[in-house]
Image (cartoon, rainbow, N blue to C red):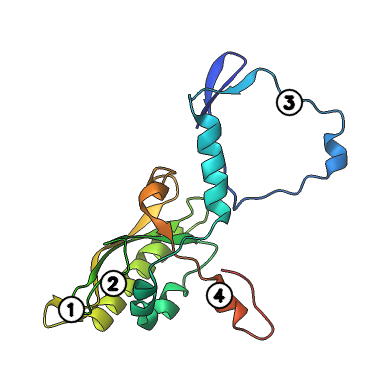
Amino acid sequence: MLFRSDGEKRVLELSALNKVFVDKKTLIGVEPDPGAVLTEKHANNTLQAWLAARYKRASFPDDLDRRMQPIKKKLSSADPKAIIGTWMRYEPENNRLSQAEPYELWVNIVYSTLEYGAKAKAENHANELRVNFEKNFREEDQWHLIYLRACEAIADTVFSVRHMNDYKQWRLEHLSLKQDPPGEFI
């Protein structure tokens, strides 16, 4: 996102995953910089959408969720330091498919460019997922239930807010809640 500071255009990068604790007492008396202004026409809306996407949960059709059952554990086996998340796009976007008609699915494994070795881990994870999709949803060169169109590792610097309009994040928090006591969220 672009913003203007002291008359110069600058790039603003935000990451909800790289949080820093700031004691409120340190902000006493601090005023916003009047020279720093977001330059895009709808920058505030973009920022709000990005923040909302960080906290809202995508919903997938119940039928697609049921069909994904055999590979859910593989989706959750990613290294959380290296891999930021798994985003999926699917067609059709409804719940009205016959068992004979597969959902078409595109998968992006988004990795952190700040973590050493993350690209290799994401590529390995994408390869493992492709193998598992084929094992569970492909027979004699025919896809059934789910047709995996693509499964790729992609850098966080390339996967943008615009991608989030087409892709939904596959979140796996429910797996952590099944443990007793609950484990860390993925």
Label 3 amino acid? Pro
- Image quadrant in which you'd find residue 135: bottom left
Label 1 amino acid? Ala
Q: Quadrant of the C terminus?
A: bottom right
Nearer to us of marks 4 and 2 is: 4
State the SS at label 1: loop
Q: Mark 3 points at which residue?
A: 32
How dense is the environment of label 1, judged by Cα within 10 Å: few (below 14), some, or many (20 and up)?
few
- The residue located at (65%, 17%) in the rendering is 35
CA distance separating discs 1 and 4: 29 Å
Residue 13 appears anywhere in the view: no
- The residue located at (33%, 78%) in the rendering is 67
Q: Where is residue 21 in the image (x, y as percent from the top left)?
A: 75, 49
Nearer to us of marks 1 and 4 is: 1
- Drawn side of residue 122 relative to residue 2, left or right: left
Q: Earlier in the sequence, mark 4 or mark 2?
A: 2
Q: Mark 2 points at which residue?
A: 130
Q: Name the residue under label 4.
A: 174
Above or below for 6 versus 153? above
Nearer to us of marks 3 and 2 is: 3
State the SS at label 3: loop
Q: Name the residue under label 1.
A: 100
